[in-house]
Image: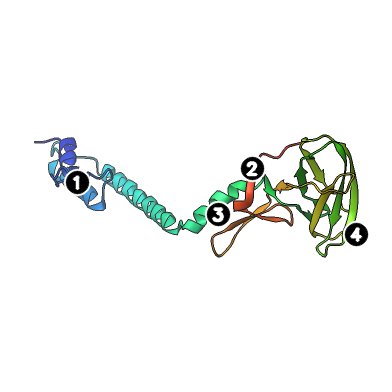
């Protein structure tokens, strides 16, 4: 009489002999039932298989079926939008840089502006509110040509949260071009069209405008 191992192997073997058909790597419910029937039919009468083994196998198969069902449900819920949001969430806590001269003020703190002077000179940062009214002027002192500089405004308690614009000028009142907005991402927002925007403190930057991403620097 054949052994139980031989019988179960034969029962689980695929019946399709077409060499061009891929053999599945997992057992279906029908395959499992065939294995159980084969074990019953081929067990040694003088040494029958312990019934608890069958019960254990049934429990394991039931658990496997539940896990597979959960996995299928999760895969079904994974939409392109949720995948995109998961990817965008990697920006949270990172420092991003994008072209622009806008700063955001929130809870008394402002985002930063990065710039590079074109000549060695004395520079000033002028800050304007959303109506174009100048609300502050900050002397930056003498800066070297080509040196990368950061300007972080310290708003007064009278300045409300919101968006402000910055203009960096030299001693001849000529504005520096190529200003960059920078800050640490606190949240991400997905639009109805699938676009992703990054909030760096009351300043929202479209993800497709981000020039660089880095770990925040500590002073």
Q: Residue at x 76, y 47 (%)?
A: 177
Of callouts 3 and 4, the N-terminal one: 3
Disc 1 versus disc 3: distance between alpha carbons? 38 Å
- Distance from the alpha carbon under mark 2 to that under mark 3: 17 Å
Q: Nearer the viewer, mark 1 or mark 4?
A: 4
The spot of residue 180 in percent (x, y) is 72, 47
Q: Comparing marks 2 and 4, which lies closer to the viewer?
A: 2
Q: x%, y% of residue 152?
A: 82, 46
| 173 relative to 98 in the view: left or right | right
Tag 3: Cα neighbours inside 10 Å, few (<14), some, or many (≥20)?
some
Q: Which mark is residue 37?
A: none
CA gap, disc 3 and disc 4: 37 Å
For the residue pair 129 and 197, the one nearer the viewer reads as: 129
SS at mark 2?
strand
The residue identified by callout 4 is 158
Q: Secondary structure at mark 3?
A: helix
Task: Say which of 25 and 63 sits in front.
Answer: 25
**In this image, 66 relative to 204: left or right?**
left
Q: Which residue is mark 2?
A: 213
Which residue is more in the foreground, 73 or 34? 73
In-image side of 71 versus 117 (left or right): left
Q: Earlier in the sequence, mark 1 or mark 4?
A: 1
| Residue 85 disc label | 3
């Amino acid at each position: 009489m054949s052994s139980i191992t031989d019988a179960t192997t034969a029962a689980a073997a695929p019946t399709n002999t077409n060499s061009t058909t891929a053999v599945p790597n997992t057992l279906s419910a029908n395959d499992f039932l065939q294995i159980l029937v084969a074990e019953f039919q081929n067990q040694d009468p003088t040494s029958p298989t312990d019934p608890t083994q069958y019960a254990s196998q049934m429990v394991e198969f039931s658990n496997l079926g539940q896990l597979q069902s959960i996995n299928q449900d999760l895969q079904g819920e994974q939409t392109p939008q949720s995948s995109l949001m998961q990817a965008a969430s990697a920006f949270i806590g990172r420092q991003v840089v994008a072209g622009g001269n806008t700063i955001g003020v929130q809870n008394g703190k402002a985002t930063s502006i990065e710039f590079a002077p074109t000549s060695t000179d004395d520079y000033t940062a002028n800050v304007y509110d959303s109506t174009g009214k100048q609300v502050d002027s900050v002397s930056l002192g003498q800066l070297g040509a080509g040196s990368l500089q950061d300007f972080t405004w310290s708003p007064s308690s009278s300045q409300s949260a919101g968006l402000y614009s910055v203009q960096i000028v030299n001693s001849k009142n000529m504005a520096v071009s190529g200003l960059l907005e920078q800050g640490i991402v606190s949240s991400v927002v997905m639009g109805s069209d699938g676009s992703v925007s990054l909030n760096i403190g009351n300043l929202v930057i479209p993800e497709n405008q981000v020039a660089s991403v880095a770990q925040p620097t500590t002073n």
